[in-house]
Amino acid sequence: MTYEEPERLALQLQALLERRASLRAILEQLALNSLLTGKERGDIHRVIALIDREMADLRKRLESLSSGPSSGGSGS
């Protein structure tokens, strides 16, 4: 099964939301957080920042598709 571009982007966005929520949950659990080194916590924060940037890019692409031509094509 193939997805059209907006559906594919929405699925990617949902997967990123879930990953970010999982990483934040790890940081919020005191028992787990106390086992992490400062470097590991920093790594998790960096991954969350990367996810946030990727989510912002996906949202921009979705917005541009929704404001583009109604045919959904590339115009070629």
Image (spheres, rainbow, N blue to C red):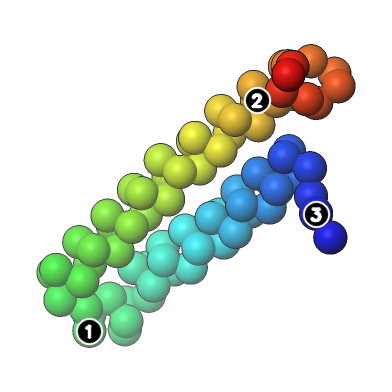
Compared across the picture, whether 41 is left or right of 55 comes to left
Compared across the picture, whether 12 is left or right of 47 comes to right
Location of the N terminus (image quadrant): bottom right
- Tell me which label, 1 or 3, sits earlier in the chain: 3
- The location of residue 48, given as percent across then percent down, is 37, 54
At label 3, the amino acid type is Thr
73 is higher (above) or lower (below) than 49: above
Say which of 56 and 36 sits in front.
Answer: 56
Which residue matches tag 3? 2
Q: Residue at x 36, y 49 (%)?
A: 50
Q: Residue at x 32, y 81 (%)?
A: 32
Mark 1–mark 3 Cα distance, whole angstroms, equals: 42 Å
Which residue matches tag 1? 35
Which residue matches tag 2? 63
Mark 1–mark 2 Cα distance, whole angstroms, equals: 41 Å
SS label for mark 1: helix
- Tell me which label, 1 or 2, sits earlier in the chain: 1
Marks 3 and 1: in contact by CB < 8 Å?
A: no
Q: Is residue 21 visible?
A: no
At label 1, the amino acid type is Leu
At label 2, the amino acid type is Glu
Which mark is in front, 1 or 2? 2
Q: Quadrant of residue 35?
A: bottom left
